[in-house]
Image (tube, rainbow, N blue to C red):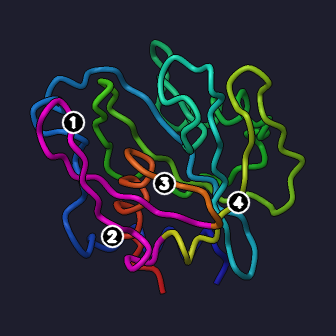
Amino acid sequence: MKLGDRLRAALSSPAAEPPLEGDLPELRARADVAAAVLIAVTERPEPGVILTVRREHMRTHAGQIAFPGGRLDPGEAAIAAALREAQEEILLDPGEVVVVGEIEPYRTVTGYIVTPVIGVISPDLPLEPHEHEVADWFEAPLDFLLDPANQQRRSALFQGVERHYYEIVWNGRRIWGATAAMIVNLSRRLQWS
């Protein structure tokens, strides 16, 4: 079975557990800016996922690992925004992406309602980071990211209250916060094995 068909079939099944809705219960209700990210999965015998490293000077989430993505333009759908942002951030040609579907939106502490869009791409495309937004990009193994054993629940004090978040460490790279939570949600939807 082709990867896209396998992903579509997995997305059509109910989630193993309810999805994570957002970062902080008291703040996620105030999230009101529509955004989308592209979870680009490489068509390989052992598929990978494309992730970016944000530049250190960025106003929000500086230096963090993220999916390519951003806010929707007026009248724009989530899929179109995810593809546009991936092209802007890593020069991923939208024509190279076979869109598989979307998973549940995730509400961030910064006020975004983020729709993750899943797409399949050919391996080894000539991706290039946007010089002002993206410091680097890399491909992490899908199996590793989706394995619940690698999705560690952590806690930290935020505004004087203990908060919980997920963290995935792969090859010395720390994936956490909203990106890790969306991976957890994808894992719950796909039930990958």
Residue identified by numbered label 4:
139
Separation of disc 4 and disc 3 at Cα?
20 Å
* Label of residue 188 in the image: 2
Q: Amino acid at mark 2?
A: Arg
Q: Residues within 10 Å of mark 2 (few under 14, many from 20)?
A: many
Tell me the kind of residue under disc 4: Glu
Q: Dot 4: few (<14), some (14–19), or many (≥20) neighbours within 10 Å?
A: some
User: Quick one: 50 or 121, which is closer to the camera?
Assistant: 50
Find the magenta span and give its range: 146-170
Identify the residue shown where x is 24% and y is 54%: 155
Q: Gap between marks 4 and 1, in whole Å? A: 30 Å
In what element is the residue under mark 2?
A: helix
Label 3, label 1: how many angstroms apart (C-alpha)?
A: 34 Å
| 140 lies left or right of 74 | right
157 left or right, relative to 148: left
Instruction: Give residue 67's quadrant in the image.
Output: top right
In this figure, which residue is indicated by the disc labeled 3? 101
Q: Amino acid at mark 1?
A: Phe
Label 3: element kind = strand
Mark 4 / mark 1, whichever is N-terminal: 4
Name the residue carrying label 1: 158
- The image quadrant of residue 130 is top right
Secondary element at tag 1: strand
Q: CA distance from mark 4 to mark 2?
A: 21 Å
| Of pointers 4 and 2, the one earlier in the residue sequence | 4
In the image, is residue 142 above or below residue 25?
Answer: below
In the image, residue 13 lies at what x, y percent? 33, 74
Q: Disc 4 on helix, strand or loop?
A: strand
Relative image position of residue 34 (x, y in whole percent):
37, 25
Q: CA distance from mark 1 to mark 2?
A: 27 Å
